[in-house]
Amino acid sequence: MTALFLRNLTLSHVRSHRRAVLALDGRPVAIYGANGAGKTNILEAVSLLSPGRGLRRAAADEVARRPEALGWKITALVQSLHQLHEVETWAEPGQPRQVTIDCKTAPQLALGRIARMVWLVPAMDRLWTEGSDGRRRFLDRMAMSFEPGHAEAVLTYDKAMRERNRLLKDGARDRHWYHALEAQMARAGAEIQDNRAATVDLLAGAQAEAETGFPTADLTLLHADGAEDGPEGEDALLAAFDEGRARDLMAGRTLAGPHRADLAATYAAKGVQAKDASTGEQKALLVSLILANARALARDFGAPPILLLDEVAAHLDATRRAALYDEICALGAQAFMTGTGPELFEPLGARAQQIEVRDVNGVSEIEERTDT
């Protein structure tokens, strides 16, 4: 299988890093250090080489190092299948994020065609117990890993819905004011639904075909208020917006559509809903889905995605940690993983690059370790 990995990564004034340069060779990267040393900031920088606001969902100005606030820049050499690309992304103070690929200005969406990424961060540990917003973002991020254009469909739908909601709050009743917005929502919404359904199917197949140390999660797409039935497809969505307008006027917002969808998961072996599973089981189900996403992407894209696994060892026992590392190496993925100490990554041995991050007077410093 061909490869997807970063050959090098340079950070300039990114969060706690004044300047950091990493020479990479495609192996997994184990990043360790004390809490607050700047480990996650490296993963966030890598995530900004994909479309969107990165794994912290931060605004452009929030990424800049304080107190200088000079703006920031991330540069990487990306091996993508059989091609090598130089990618830069940066933001000046008060300005939106910019992207160049091979020295040419590019939209963020183009990043998704070069590098596919999947990430798991500690905030996702609450995925099965929090509100549906987090599960939709989780699913949409996976959908975007298969189809980068999914991000555009979500943006189009959300923009049109915000305009429709403004009309609803203002009490506008002229149907003609709604028609164009509802048509946009129906077209983009149908695309969102198709992409989400295709993603769930791909994940199910990738889980079923794999022998893994992690439990299988049975996934179900739900509509508004947890219902398994609802409007699907452009025509059905358009009709739902039209027929539900009186109810939406009373609520002051749109009450049906892909923005109300949810993702339910069941621990297949036990028949227990993920929200009722133990903390360790919930973490294992998350890891299982991330690995399934990676396996499915390896087939779909032609190379496994770059994995960003922040504090991945949390809530995993030693056996499952070792199983995770074995699966990452078998997949051939470049995985950036963080943890508080090198002992968490001992099972990887020479299969991974080991990088220590230290805080020195408020500045993150990095050093590659070769003694493991």
Image (cartoon, rainbow, N blue to C red):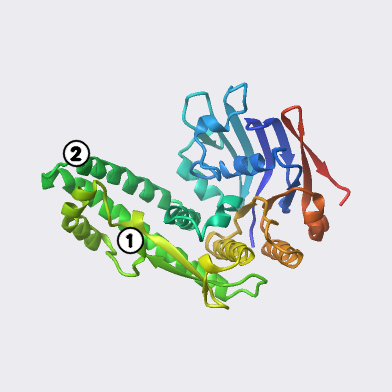
Residue 46, quarter of the rendered image: top right
What residue sits right under mark 2 in the picture? Answer: 170
Instruction: Report whether residue 205 is seen.
Output: yes
Disc 1 target residue: 224
- Residue 167's quadrant in the figure? top left
Q: Which mark, residue 48?
A: none
x, y percent for residue 115: 56, 49
- Badge 1 marks a residue whose secondary structure is helix
Is residue 32 positioned above or below 228 on the image?
above
Q: Position of residue 61 (x, y in %)?
A: 52, 29
Location of the N terminus (image quadrant): bottom right
Left or right: 26, with 151 as reference point = right
Secondary structure at numbered mark 2 = helix
Q: Is residue 223 visible?
A: no
Residue drawn at the location 49% of the way across and 44% of the way down: 51
Badge 1 amino acid: Ala
Residue type at numbered disc 2: Asp
Q: Position of residue 313 (x, y in %)?
A: 70, 57
In-front residue for pair 318/237 = 318
Above/below status of 220 relative to 350: below
Name the residue nearer the viewer: 227 or 138.
Answer: 227
Q: Position of residue 206 (x, y in %)?
A: 55, 70
Tell me: 179 left or right of 34. left
* Mark 2 → mark 1, Cα distance in angstroms: 24 Å
Q: Dot 2: few (<14), some (14–19), or many (≥20) neighbours within 10 Å? A: few
Query: Which residue lies most toward the right here?
Result: 371
Earlier residue among tags 2 and 1: 2
Circle 1 residues within 10 Å: few <14, some 14–19, many ≥20: some
Q: Residue at x 62, y 45 (%)?
A: 78
